Structures are given as C-alpha cells and as structure tokens.
Image: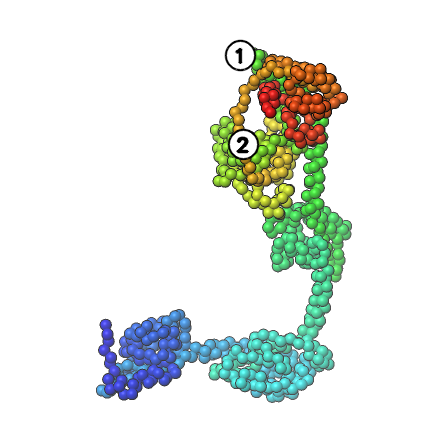
Amino acid sequence: MTQKNPLPARMLESKNFLQTIIDTEPECVKLVASDGTLIMMNPAGLSMIQVDSLEQVKGKSVYGLVTPQYREAFKKLTEEVFQGKTGNLTFEMRGVKGRRLWLNTHAVPLRNDQDEIIALLGITRDVTERKKFEETILEQKRFAENLVASSAVATFVLDPRHKVVVWNRACEELTGKASSDMVGTDDHWKAFYGQKHPTLADLLIDGTMDQGPSLYSTFAPSVLIPNGQRAERWVPALNGKDRYLTFDAAPVYDSKGQLSVVIETIHDVTERKQAEESLKEEKKFSDAVIDSLPGIFYICDEQGTLIRWNNNLLEVAGYSGEVLSHMNVSGLFLEDRELMTGKMKEAFELGRVSTEARILTKRGARIPFLLTGFRMIMNDKRYLVGTGIDISERKRLEDELRQSQKMESIGTLAGGISHDFNNILTAIIGYGSILQRKLDAKDPLRYNADQILKAANRAAGLTRGLLAYSRKQILNPQPVNVNEIVVKVERFLARLIGEDVELKSILAEQEITVLADADQIEQVLMNLATNARDAMPDGGYIYIETRLVELDEASAKARELRRPGAYAQISVTDSGMGMDEKSRERIFEPFFTTKDVGRGTGLGLAMAYGIIKQHNGAIEVESEAGLGTTFRIYLPVVQRTAETQSAAFPAVKGGTETILVAEDDEVVRSLVTSALTQSGYTVIQAENGEEAVNKFMDNRGAIKLLLLDVLMPKKNGKEVYDKIRIFEPGVKALFISGYTADVMHQKGLLDEGLNFMLKPVPMDDLMRKVREVLDGE
C-alpha cells in the first residue's frame, strides 16, 4: 500500500530542499514518523547501517534496529520530539548485516506550513570508536594507578611533554638519580643512556594523538616498539656497571583520546641474561653433539623423569618434546617396564649397566634397542645418562639365522631318514594295500589291515611334513587360480569340520593366478582350517577370503618377500579361542602344539610355513587370546599363459610289457615286482646299477620301461639311464626315490623333467604312472 507523502509539495519543489540535504550531508540524516516508521534516510545513513538502498528499510520501524536496552529510551525521545522538544541520545544499534554500532542522535521536530509536527529529523553520528576509547581509558588508568602504587621494580611516569611525573625508589637505586632531580625534567633517557632523548611527540605520527591507543611508544633512541610489547637492550655503564634492561610501557589516554601519561617499567635482568647467553651457547653445543650421535640419547633423574634427549629419540618414539618432558623413561618401554625399572636401579647402584629393551612408539611399533646407561652426579644430584642403538636389523638377521639353522637341521634329519624310512613305508603301505584288497569288507581282519594303512599313511605324512618345513619336498608348480583352489577346499571342508561351524568363502571378483603346486596349497588351507576347527570346540565360523593386494618395498621387506608387487592374499579367519603372544611367536615351529597330547604332531603349521616359503611367499598370523585368529598367505601373482584342464582320475590298468625294476631294497623290489606281475607285466629285477645295465643289454629288445631307484650301489638311477640311452635313445624311464628334493636336483632328475615319484608310493598310483609313461610319447 502506497503511503501519502506528508510533506508539502512547495517544500519539496523549493530547490529540492530535502534532496540537497540527502546529497550533501556527511552525517546520517533521517526522517522518522511518530510511530517510529522510517520515511527517508540519506546515503551516509544507509551506509552506516549497511544497506544498499532506501527501499530495504523504508516504511520499517527504526526501533527494530536499536538494541533492546535502548529501545524504550529511543521511543521516549521520539515522543518528546513530536511534543515539540529537541533531544539527544547515545545508544547501541544493530546494523542490518549484524554490525553493532554506538550512535549519537540529535533529534528535532520537522513542521509543515500549518506549524504541525510531521516528522522527526535526526542527525546521527557514529561514536563507536569513541566508546571503545573510553572503555580502554578506564582500564588503562586503573592499571597505571595500581602499577605505580605497588611496583617494586623501577617505574617512572611521563606526561605528554615527556616530563617525569613520578620517579620511584627502584629507579633511584638502579640509576643513582634521585627523584627530586628527575621529576619535572625530560632527562630520564639521559639517566639510562647518558644522552638526551627526543621528546615523545617528536616520534608520534604527525605529532598528534588522534590515532588513539594504536600509536607506538618509544623505549630506546630511534627505536619504535608497538604498544604492549617489550624492548630489551644492554645499557653501558649504568650507575657504574653495564646492565641488561627490559623496558615496558603503558600509555594512558584521557576521555578525549589524548595522551594522559606514559608509565614505563624497567627490569634489571643482567645476571639472568648472562646466564641465559652462557646456557644458550652451552646448550647449542651440547645439542649439536648429542644430535650427532648415531642412536638415541636421554638423561633422566632418579625418578626416571626425562629431562634431556636428542632428535633421534623424538623421531623414533614419535612423541613431541612437550610430551617427553612429562614422561617417565620407563613409559617409552611399556612392554619392558619392569625390566627397565630394575636396570635403572642397578645403574644408580653400580654406576653402569647394559640391556636390551623394546621402545613402544606412539604408532604402536616395537623397536628393539641395545641400551647402555651410566650414573652421572651433578650438583649433588644423581642422573642416568642413557644411549641406545637400534638392533632391529640385527634381530631380524639373528631370527633368520636361527630359522635357517633350525630348518637346515630338520632338513638334514628328514633327508637322512627319509630314504630308508620311505622304503619301509612303501613296503608297509604296498603289502597292506594288497592285504586289504584280498580281505572282504566283513572279514574281522579287514579292520586290522585298515589300521595298518592308516598308521603308515600318518607316518608318511610326518615325513612329508618335515620335508615341507625344511623346503626339501618336490613341487609341481603350475599356473593356478587361487579362487578355484579355495572352492575345491571348501567342498571338502564342508564335510569335515562339522555342522556347528559356519564355513564361508569370500572370493575376489577378478581371477588371481599364481605359480604353485595346487595340491600343496590345498594342503596348507586344509591344515589351517582343521586347526581353526579344533580351536572352536563349541562351534563358530571360519572365513576364507581371497584378495589381490599390492605390496610396496617396505611391506614386502617386512614379510621377508623377495620383491614388491602384486600378490594373492588368502586369509583364513576363525572365531576360536585365539592365542597369546608367546604361542604366536612359536606357532610355525615343528612339533610345537597347544593341543592335548595325542591330538596332533605339531607339524601342520610348520608344514604350511615351509610350503608357502618354498613358493616364494609369506604366511603371517594375527591373534589374541579369546578373540580368534587370522592367517594371511601371500603368493606372487603371475600372468596365466594357458588354461590347464583337469583330467578325470584314471582307473588302474595293467599291461603285458616287459619292465626292468632296479631297486637295492629287497622288500621294495619284491613288492613292486609283485604288483607289476599281478597287473600282467613281465618283470626283470636288478639289485644295483651295474646289474641293471647288464640285464638291459641281455634283454635289449624286450624291455619297454626302466623303473629305477635314484640312489643304488655301483651306479645310481640317473647313471643307469644315461648309459642305456647310449644304446637305446628312446628308452622310457620312471624314477622312484625316498630322498629329498635337493638330492633330486643334484642328480639332475628334476632339471631335465624326467618322470619321477616320491616314496612311499601307493601301488595303485604306481600302476597308473607306469601305464601313463608306457602310453606317452
């Protein structure tokens, strides 16, 4: 709704009177109706309340802009103006955009030709800065009065002309100048510097004080220091002695913003400054020395509180200097706190001590250090000076050496017994299988035969476990998809682990190919899963997950892998009882087990460790007592060059060919001969290498296959094969042995890709392999 303009047209037309005021007046001019409604405001006013045009506030109540505590006063002023009075009011106002202002308004009535009051004409000035000055002045005057009255240090007061008003007793003692000689003079700087100082006004901006308390005060000749800061300097020959003084100033202003007085305080800190300079130089030198040490360095008191350290300790621990200053040295060695407490006591008693302990860093890393501490006495107080060298690499090498020696000894043991032991097991398993096939399933003796084979297979597994841990077993690596291995193992485990255990596989979306012996990797997963099942007597879950991960150099090195890059990660997680740290440290050791007696050989995880290491991979464990266990396997990823197809397991077939069997062990030779004969083959036997060559030459046209033991008296199997090939280049051969993989490599069997079987050999498997070699190219 458009309001009718109450102003006479003649007044508006008279040289645009109101417009002239609006355009020329630098202060805020506004017209307000009797109800407080804003009629008009000039540009200066609009700018003051932070609006862009009159239309934003025209027709609105000005009372809404005034803060509540002054609203009634402004209404009363308006009422008085419309009663014909003039008024003046200083009030706090809120701008449209939130700015708070202190304003002073002089208000008069505006009348029409009939002498009627038609509006309030207000001239408003911004007095915000003045109000701030007044508040500052009150605080500074109180400060000045209290400081001068109670100061025990040298304090003097100057007036705006730079004349001394007050010269306290401390100033007299410091300078040797009496108060009676100084008050009323401008010789205060001469008293301190031996020269006349320029007046304060000479150094102020334009020589005036209209800039308020933001001006600078002077503390030394030709030096300007911002108000509220401190100046420090050496003063030569002050009262007969060079002194180091600090100067503080507090200018005090009156209600008009004019300088009232300047209060200056002077502190003699000569001895402190000299001590600081000396300590600064000494500390600079000692810091350079201790920071150059190759390891960590620290000093603590008898309570263990750290009081000095080098940068290496900060970097290793990961804490700030502020945190270390409140830390006990034993707090750095949380997991070895008891050890460190005892060693510190020993060091204070004996004077020197050495030990190994692990720093637990802020990031949770445990870093082993070789620590040396010795007692130091200074000012009748005892301190412990400690140095430490990071022995992480040494520990790693020691662990690798111990592991290597352990594996070597186990490998030597396994290799030493494997040949004879596997010959014995071949005979037991072979004759046991023959006996088992001849006994009817209902025959009472069938149970005995089954138990014989079961025990023999367990014994064979024991030998394989030892060879696997020592990495001396024979591998047949092929490009395989880890997801397919997990799926195959999962099907078998579902029948094995029981209904009270949830088994779930979480497979990577992409195919992940590794170069591995699939049977061996399956054996590892089987071992891990059966271990997990045994750790959950009341049921739980087992999750097997595959992922493709990228390991950087640091991650690969931490897992003792040969190179960084892409790896297949297979995780086996269970919700079982978990294990403590001591068990985790020994979990891959052969014959170490947490199971009850008779429930395990302690070779399952050792075998898994050896198999994965033999595949150039890594296996790690994460576990806490009561919180389950996770094993993670890392195998290097390869590009799949060809798809392999799994053939159906062939049935056992016999034949009519003539086979030369060369085996120095009579029992094994007799067993193999019997099995081949029962399958229809003709067998020629030889007890050693020379006999094998001779019998082949005697039956050269008839023998179709050489079945050779690798190590025999007079000539080993490879030598027999090489000799016969001179006369019969296309002869076919199958090697069997109970020796380890390193022996096979030494004899060249594995390198040349010859047909090979490792004892103990089940007779059915041997018959299949014989048929395969005879039928092959």
Q: Is residue 555 visible?
A: no
Q: Which amino acid type is marked by label 1?
A: Lys
How many labels sit on residues? Answer: 2
Name the foreground residue: 180 vs 635.
Answer: 635
Residue 281 versus residue 588 in the image, above or below: below
Tag on residue 302? none
Residue 25 versus residue 704 in the image, above or below: below
Q: Find out whether the residues at labels 2 and 1 contact each other: C-beta distance under 8 Å.
A: no
Q: Residue 546 in the image: state x and y as whole percent.
A: 52, 38
Residue 735, image quadrant: top right
Q: Nearer the viewer, mark 2 or mark 1?
A: 2
Q: Which amino acid type is marked by label 2?
A: Thr
How many C-alpha atoms fall within 10 Å of the one at disc 2: few (<14), some, or many (≥20)?
few
Separation of marks 2 and 1 at Cα, in angstroms: 42 Å
Q: Residue 469 in the image: state x and y as whole percent.
A: 65, 32
Q: Residue 251 in the image: state x and y as whole percent.
A: 55, 80
Name the foreground residue: 78 vs 555.
Answer: 555
Residue 20 versus residue 404 in the image, above or below: below
* Identity of the residue drawn at 71% across and 39% down: 401
* Identity of the residue drawn at 73% across and 58% down: 381
Position of 153 compared to 351: left or right?
Answer: left
What element does badge 2 sit on?
loop
* Identity of the residue drawn at 62% across and 80% down: 223
What element does badge 1 sit on?
loop
Q: Quadrant of the C terminus?
A: top right
Query: Which residue, given by chain and number where applicable, does mark 2 sit on?
Result: 644
Position of 613 compared to 697: left or right?
Answer: left
* Identity of the residue drawn at 54% across and 86% down: 207
Q: Is residue 443 visible?
A: yes
Residue 396 versus residue 41 in the image, above or below: above
Query: Which residue, given by chain and number where applicable, does mark 1 sit on?
Result: 442
